[in-house]
Amino acid sequence: MKPTQILRVAIVALPLAACSDMSPTQQRALTGTTGGAAGGALIGAIAGNAGMGAAIGAGAGLAGGLLYDYHKRTEASAYQRGVQQGSTQRSGTQ
């Protein structure tokens, strides 16, 4: 394998390995930020300023990722409350 090929593999593999021990909140924030930055850069390139578009997109993506995380945590909490109520009602009727 050529050194440039090894470098390419490392560039792809290292960021993926770094995400393995992140919390779900951190993963969602990172996903939103990178997706927003990519979309913003694309729109910014069309409009004439890719850097500004990427910065705005990253901020919007971060906010979106954190809002999505809040929704998922609220959903999980409501599910757990339902499980607790269901088990309490079951044990009370027997």
Image (cartoon, grey):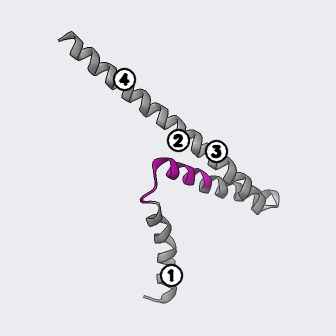
Q: CA distance from mark 2 to mark 4?
A: 20 Å
Please give the residue where the numbered disc 4 appears in the rendered image.
82
Identified at 52% across, 51% down, the residue is 26
- Determine whether the residue tagged by mark 2 lies in a helix, strand or loop: helix
Q: CA distance from mark 4 to mark 1?
A: 50 Å
Q: Nearer the viewer, residue 12 or 18?
A: 18
Tell me the amino acid under the disc marked 1: Leu
Tell me the amino acid under the disc marked 4: Gly
Identified at 48% across, 83% down, the residue is 5
Which of the two marks, 2 or 1, is nearer to us in this view? 2
- Position in image of residue 7 (x %, y %): 51, 81
Q: CA distance from mark 2 to mark 3?
A: 10 Å
- Position in image of residue 14 (x %, y %): 48, 70
Q: Which residues are magenta?
A: 20-33
Tell me the amino acid under the disc marked 3: Ala
Tell me the amino acid under the disc marked 2: Asp
Instruction: Give the numbered dot on residue 7.
Output: 1
- Determine whether the residue tagged by mark 1 lies in a helix, strand or loop: helix
Which of the two marks, 4 or 1, is nearer to us in this view? 4
- The quadrant holding residue 53 is bottom right
- The local crowd at label 2, few if under 14, some if 14 to 19, many if 20 or more residues have their Cα within 10 Å, is some
Q: Quadrant of the N terminus?
A: bottom left
Instruction: Give the numbered dot on residue 63.
Output: 3
Q: CA distance from mark 3 to mark 4?
A: 29 Å
Image position of 45 (left or right of 8): right
- Determine whether the residue tagged by mark 3 lies in a helix, strand or loop: helix
23 falls in the magenta region: yes
Q: Residue furthest left?
A: 94
Please give the residue where the numbered disc 2 appears in the rendered image.
69
| Above or below, 6 relative to 51 | below
Identified at 55% across, 53% down, the residue is 31
62 falls in the magenta region: no
